[in-house]
Image (cartoon, rainbow, N blue to C red):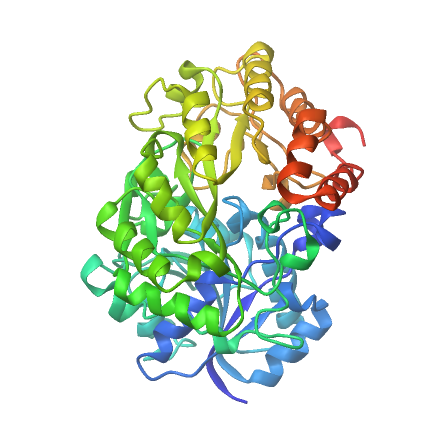
Amino acid sequence: MKTDVLFVNPGSHQAIYQALSKDYSAIETPTWALLLAQSVRAVGYFPGILDVNAERLSTVEAVERIIGNEPRLICFVVYGQNPNSGTTNMVGVVELANALKSAGVINPICAVGTHISAVPTQVLEAESSLDFVLCNEGVYALRNILSADPTDPACLGRVRGIAYRINGKVVLTDPESVVPQERMDIDLPGYAWDLLPYKEKPLDLYRSHFWHAEYDHNKRSPFAAIYTSLGCQFKCEFCMINIINRDDNDEIGVAGNYANMRFWSPEFIIKQFDQLVQLGVRTLRISDEMFLLNKKYYVPLCKMLRDRGYGEILRMWAYSRIDTVHDPRQLRLIREAGIKWLCLGIEAAEQKVRLRAIKGKFKDLDIQEIVKTVHDADINIIANYVFGLPGETFASMKKTLDLSLDLCTVGWNAYPAMALPGSALYKSAIENGYGLPDTYSGYSFHSYDTLPLPTEKLSPAEILEFRDKAFEVYHTDKEFLRKVEVIFGKDAATNVTDLTRIKLKRKILGD
């Protein structure tokens, strides 16, 4: 079947998640491939989606499938379930793109994603198998490319918002805009769910995070993830989410320069929920960076979810900052809507560490009281922490671990601070001469060759070792396991114990 553009979600799960990739890491629906496919379909083009990751295809199998689709354009969509995935998934992009060229494929190959938006020139200089790249979310650039000849450099030169080669030199065209607020429902008109692969029923190749399914493997599929908004208004130094809003040609893009949020209308979004419920999805992630920030959008949506009875059948989670969930009335509404988990960015116990990471107006809050308020609303918490932020010491990291044990949330996640391309930490690391990973996989929090940032007092190895030991300490803590058993049952607690037996190998720790 011929397609105008084949969106490819690359496969690099095993290289990133090591032994966790088999049974534990999430397999998320390729959100931006779905959005872009529906966007081009809305203006008359015929898209396809090849999810190499979900189908667990080998490189040889993926090449055969791509050739069989006869696409005018091959577009790698390089995002993922964690903020670092736009960089780490480049592993799969490069391997497959090189294989396509080696197989004699002459169709133009492009890529879009967060890593590419951060350093588009660097990507094209390093990866000869990519013919051009899209420099932000790519919605309008992609439409303009499909209306022309993507094999003709002269045509590419007239498209805004891309980087391409001419006579061996990488050229950046003038920046292209992202979809403005007033055209979100029109130019990003939903998700092409029908283009996804499945085994027996829709979305059964996808699975949620383990904790999201209450530590029960049987509840993880079918699974989907959607946005109700894009971007974030804050400028945290360790985050690169806003890089998709990029509207300049600086050599290195810094996400904090493009802090902006755009929303679909609640009336539009509820139709996406309706469709997923009809497809049999019960475990669902709201991927917005700040879902509980703008009441104009989330309150009417939550009321519609509640009034449809979805709060009784859906198992959803959403992100929020710790300083935006103190109102019991707000919490009652989102619980009635089916949001049974909140992912709270607590980050660090010490206020001075949080402030150095520039988390907007992050007040010195009573975190214990806020967590209690959320728990009292019958909402579970997955708490996020970061070890190794600027200014960290062993003492401050120990305070964060102790705080997490005291809060005893039934979900816990911690990362070592990484210089993710697109973040302010990345640009600062380059300017200060810090060692950075020499592989794409090295930017993964879970990979064998991961390389966190140092601090003034701590080496990357010391930070990583602390993080990995903290994971084990927390997930084997008797009070935590008792709480999991009380809320989710004995089997769930046993499953958590099984998870802790899987050890990640780390190069810088001598594994």
Is 114 displayed left or right of 157 in the figure? Answer: right
Residue 150 figure quarter: bottom left
Quadrant assignment, res 205: bottom right
Quarter where residue 98 is shown: bottom right
Q: Looking at the image, which residue is at 38% across and 68% down? A: 272
170 or 150, which is in the foreground?
A: 150
Determine the residue positioned at 54% across, 18% down.
Answer: 455
Comparing 376 with 146, the one in front is: 376
Q: Which percent across, then down, holds residue 254? A: 36, 39
Total marks placed? 0
Above/below status of 96 relative to 45? above
Residue most extreme to the left: 182
Q: Is residue 370 above or below residue 350?
A: below
* Residue sitting at x 56%, y 27%: 453
Residue 263 in sight: yes
Any part of residue 157 in sight: no
Spot occupied by residue 270 in the image (x, y as percentages of width and height): 34, 65
**Quadrant housing the C terminus:** top right
389 w.r.t. 375: above or below:
above
Percent position (x, y) of residue 295? 24, 46
Screen quadrant of the N terminus: bottom right
Residue 446 in the image, given as x and y percentages of width and height: 66, 40
